[in-house]
Amino acid sequence: MNLFTRPMRLLTAVVLEQMSDAVVKSLLEMGVMDFVHINKLEPQQMEKLSSRPSSVTRIALEDMRHRVEAILRQGQVSLPTSDVLDVKNMEKPDLDSYASLLDALGKKLLVLKEKQKESNQQVLGFDEMHRYIDEDKGEYLDLRVGEISHGTAEDLASRLATFGGILEPYPDGNKYISLTLRRDGSQVSPLLDKFGWTESSDVTAQKRAVSIVTHRLEEEHRKAAVQRKEVEGEVNDLIRAESSSLIAIWGNLRLNELSDQIRSYFSYTRNTTLFSGWVPSDQADEVTKAIFSSSEGQCVIEWTEATQMPREEVPVAVTSPKLLEPFQKMVNNYSTPEYGTVNPTIFVMIAYLVMFGLMFGDVGQGFVLLLVGFLTQLSYRKNPLKKDGMLSRNLSKLLPYLGVSSMVFGVLYGSYFGFALFPALWFNLDAVVAGNATTGPVRDVYGILGITIKFGIIVIYTGLVLNWINLFRKKAWLKMTLDKNGIVGGILFATGLYMGFGFVGSNYKEFPSDPWIPIVLGVTILLLFLRGFLDYYLSVKEGGQRESAGKVIMDSTMEWLVDMLEIFGGYLSNTLSFMRVAGLGIAHAALMESFKELSSLSSGVGAIAILVLGNALVIVLEGLSSGIQSLRLNYYEFFSRYFTGKGVAYEPVGLKTSFSAQK
């Protein structure tokens, strides 16, 4: 894992046009170049360049690929991944040939789909009628017992089947039982009249018909369900028989899509091809060798260091171990770090898990989170086509971390599904909240509040230090020193903390009277006031616009006042914001104490049920609240100190390029 974003270099290359196909395949196979359009040449040189429209548009390739994917899904075949892609197999796509194959397969599938539709309608119709019988809702059914004088029973049965109805012989005599839905009565009655239907007036026969027809419904339902399953099997078998051809077509379409994406960045002269893109510095030599080899040495390659380009134009590549993927996604969801700054992933992970554990410390409930996370991941692995549910794939990867954090703090708190089964290694949170703690370093809720405030101070100062490191790497000396989040701001924050803790230590009677305090406050406030003037001076020195003295004084004073408000008000509110960690931790313990009290008022199965349901409710509600608050504190109290979010994501084009990354 890199502590900082990966160093990048900009490649600009020229190759002979006849070698461009080989170069594209080579770059596609490597998949490390984030292409940019050629824009560094002089205007008169740019006029000599042109683009080359591809023979097949990327939209046509994507549409055809989507058709292939839709057919594979119908056959319950897992969609191919980048693992099946091999640039050696790439050839010019024959869309007409592909379309003919898909059309022929589609016609066969259409016939089977019609059968499947009929079977499905029958199953649903039988289900509906059976439900009405079970629920004694005869008003929705049209049940008749009678005789026919025209035609055959087989013919009438097939006609009724088109309405989802059935015709069953009555055990005695020449009577038949007709069962349809009442809403189809306007069509069924004329049909029965054509067959000379004569209704029976035997009340006993009507009652007996219900049990007879119920048995027939179950039988027909089984037949229709089997038929539907058989048709589904035929669909799957048909598609799987063609799966190798479909996957081969998919692979060639995908390779040509990616190739066209790369070529969209190319510019051409009469005989040469020009392209440019960003590559991680540690892979620059490999890219050079690949281009040189694929172009048979007929190329010119130039590398530009990222330091020679504006930072906002350099793409940001952040490398983190796969184990940290959930926390990397948290960073990505917020924004992309600025190039050359600290990779915040590891710090986010530590802060997030500690916050969550402080709020949700319980060994038993943590184990449940751990187990649910692993089981959900296993379910998604077994069913790769399964859509994300309430517990998404990303959340299922985060849950084991949350479970471990909860278990660790549960041991520290001595909490096991809300019970103190073993002594706490730190302090008994439940006892503290209940007001009966007699041992441990914390014996009241004020102690819990103090812990979370101190933790918040550590988080804020970590953010400040990371900010100083980022500014040092950017050589932004003025901002690193004379800024509310710079060294001067950090000194003011530390001084305020010293005074605050001194005030609390005096039992809220007086602030510390150390002689150095007014000196530090005066110097730091003066330095912050001078910052605006120094900033203007340096701007003019570098060729910036000159302003009138009055405007400079006004702007500098207003900026200073805003900084003072943010330092004295913002730092205080940011620090106290971490008290919500204590609040949720106290709420968690209080809820468990309430459920234990309710359980004690009952006995046997009722008491156990209250505890089980109480734990389930706490896991869902408190777990969700703790996760959200941990994320909020990271974003608003931690990131605000050092994270600029001005970066441009590194998006190389290669075989593993995601569909969403395509432009």
Image (cartoon, rainbow, N blue to C red):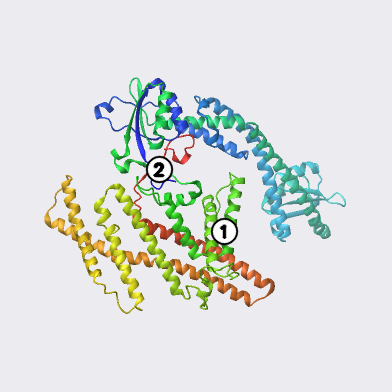
| Dot 2 alpha-carbon crowd within 10 angstroms: few under 14, some 14 to 19, many 20 or more | many
Side of 258 where 159 appears, left or right: right
Quadrant of the snapshot with the C terminus: top left
Q: Which residue is tagged 1?
A: 369
Residue 250 position in % (x across, y down): 54, 32
The quarter of the picture where residue 262 lies is top left
**Secondary structure under the numbered disc 1 in the rendered image:** helix
Residue sitting at x 48%, y 65%: 358
Residue toward you, 126 or 423 = 423
Q: Is residue 181 visible?
A: no
Residue sitting at x 57%, y 38%: 79
Residue 443 position in % (x across, y down): 48, 75
Per the model, the C-alpha gap separating discs 1 and 2 is 32 Å
| Dot 1 alpha-carbon crowd within 10 angstroms: few under 14, some 14 to 19, many 20 or more | many
Q: Which residue is tagged 2?
A: 317
- What amino acid is at disc 1? Leu
Residue sitting at x 51%, y 61%: 624
- What amino acid is at disc 2? Ala
